Image: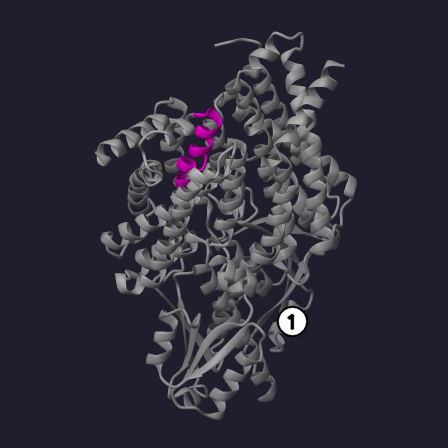
Amino acid sequence: MRLGALVRKEFLQIVRDPSSIAIAFLMPLFLLALFGYGVSLDAERVPLALVAEAPSTDSAEFFAALGGSPSFAPRTMDSMVAAERALLQGEVDGIVRLRADFARASRDANGAPVQVLVNGIDTNTARLVQGYIEGAWSAWLAARAARDGGALAVPVDIAPRIWFNGELRSRNYLVPGLVAIIMTLIGALLTALVMAREWERGTMEALLVTPTSMSEVLLGKLAAYFVLGTGGMLLSVALAVWWFEVPLRGSFWVLWAAASLFLLAALGMGLTISTLARSQFVAGQVAILATFLPAFLLSGFMFDIGSMPPVVQALTHLVVARYFVAIVQTLFLAGDVWAVILPNAAALAAMAALFLGLTWRKSRKRLE
Amino acid sequence: MMWRRLLALVHKEFLALLKDPRSRTVLIVPPLMQLLVFGYAASFDLKDVPFAVYDEDGGAAARELVAHFAGAPAFRLVATLRDEQALRPLLDTRRALLVLRLGPRFGADLAAGQGARVQVIIDGRNSNTALLALNYVRGIVQRYNEDWLAARGRAGPPAHLATRAWFNPNLESRWFFVPGIIGMLTLVTAMLVTALSVAREREQGTFDQLLVTPLRPSEILLGKAIPGLLIGLAQASVVLLLATSWFRVPFLGGLGAFYLGLTLFLLSGVGVGLLISAMAATQQQGLLGAFLFMVPAVILSGFATPIANMPEAVQALTWLDPLRYFLVVLRKLFLEGADLALLLPQLWPMALIALGTLTLAAWLFRHRMY
């Protein structure tokens, strides 16, 4: 009965200051639309400069192999000077140069060198370009070997088979990850200021003199924002599945359950920040620091956790989003793999218990 | 007279920021810790990728290929499979990122000179990691091929690639990301100092008092902007020192150009923060605004994903993002050692954003009342 009244009060506050509703619904809509389109690691039509110092049928054949791939938008250039200037100014991402003796040297025992220049400032693009050129190069080798009658040029050849995401569509892995990042933000943002606000405005003291217990106050807040957060979560999942057409191979109900656990942990984190900071200003600052960048960089959403140094890997265990990213990527692309879901869900439950317990302990009925 | 007023206001703003020990800690400790942690975390270089082998051939040639993988620092052998059933659970549970499968005719095909095939089954859930790992696999197989041909005295392929990377010869991922992190942390600091400051005064009613003092809106603006600028400058200096001395990222450019770029970027960041703050009626709204700006600003800045890969419409949106320009400035300064003339196309847009947002914020101080 008292709890019902508290939840009602929280809902009234939410409706009166629509920024909470904006956080729950506008933010996923805006961010998913932006990122779903904005973030892509698939390079297409990479601008490439081709320089043949002495054009011949051999060099034309080699360039044709590069031009035939959809990964490149090649431009033939007359001189290395012009090509280097284009590379420096970022007009092209790489240069492929065939020396004047290419035709002759390619019939030698040692083979002809093909010079490839990339701009290393953007290392990732440089690597991708390098990989694409290598792909085109081996295709050219195979074609040439077949034409010349099976002179074996490539002893071992690779046949990649990619599971769960056949075309390696980066959107398929980024969008589920984004759902996790966005839910971290929503969860923490919704509650980061609510306890601090009550203390700052003095309404907490008013609550203290009523018969309600602190647990009821906390539960009231948690219930109200949990409902709001669930709404945001459903919206995000709906967008991912129907708008971005990411396949959901696992069960929706497992996703729901995992998301609820995660939401409890994220809301708990916000409440903890709010309770410990006591002023909205500090709580806001901590929320800015503790949510977005750690979730973005340390959750395994963008960077492979296994490749980080052990100390940093240990730190990623403190990032709530890490567990949820693992769950959503598996649920969306692989299906209900319990060996992945259960340990991560247990970790989420532990984090939720930790944060909520901490909040409860630190916010006993007491004035400072 | 004006200077004394301004000084008093700046003094008060600093007190508001630094008097609370919690707020003080928040401003000083996290940026340094974050650079350390993120500097190690943000990398597209793979290490210890867990892989498994399903070798149906078992001959010497096959074992040698596997040894090439097990010996590479990028890979770590976690399992050797005996049958096909074991393959799926290994990938499903993410215990291995990829499985090398060598068919029963691997050695025979290779000896017959027909070319053998190795199947690489890879977990595509994280498509970026999958692509990177596949590139590593290609490199190792290529080396194996070269060794194999050389050992048998056969002619190599008619052409081979000799790749050279400018400015970052070993293509170290860290050299790309650490300068980016400096930009990101600076943006976060600018937001921390400014995004809630006017909103807090509005909520507590002290902003109305400020408005009835002889201070002009432009002076209030300066008073609010200067602490953010100074804290940002100090913090970025320490972070720069850490990036070059701890992470050993080469810094080839001039310090003058760095501080000019940094000041313009901070002014634009502070401008956006104050604009958000001036529009917000409560701190809750200020916080929401800060995130609605900060998150897209980071994602669309080209920090991790190239702007050139974005659709045209989104690319147009990035022109409004001050971080986009600052990241180019930082990377060009660190690795290329660019001079001011080369950086100019990045500097004036930041100045423009700063001017626009700061002017609008000052105007809103008086014209948005509750």
Where residue A194 sits, quadrant-wise, is top right
Q: Position of residue B52 (x, y in %)?
A: 62, 52
Question: In this picture, is B365 found above or below A211?
Answer: below
Q: Nearer the viewer, residue A272 or B110?
A: A272
- Name the residue rendered at 65%, 15% in the picture: A215
Q: Nearer the viewer, residue A144 or A274?
A: A274
User: In the image, which residues are magenta?
Assistant: B189-205
Q: Position of residue B5 (x, y in %)?
A: 26, 32
Residue A278 on the magenta segment: no
Going by the image, does B16 lie left or right of A72?
left
Q: Nearer the viewer, residue A51 or A77?
A: A77
Q: Secondary structure at mark 1?
A: helix
Question: In this picture, is A29 found above or below B5?
Answer: below
Q: Residues within 10 Å of mark 1 (few under 14, many from 20)?
A: some
Q: Is residue B230 visible?
A: yes
Q: Which residue is mark 1?
A: B108
Q: Is residue A149 visible?
A: no
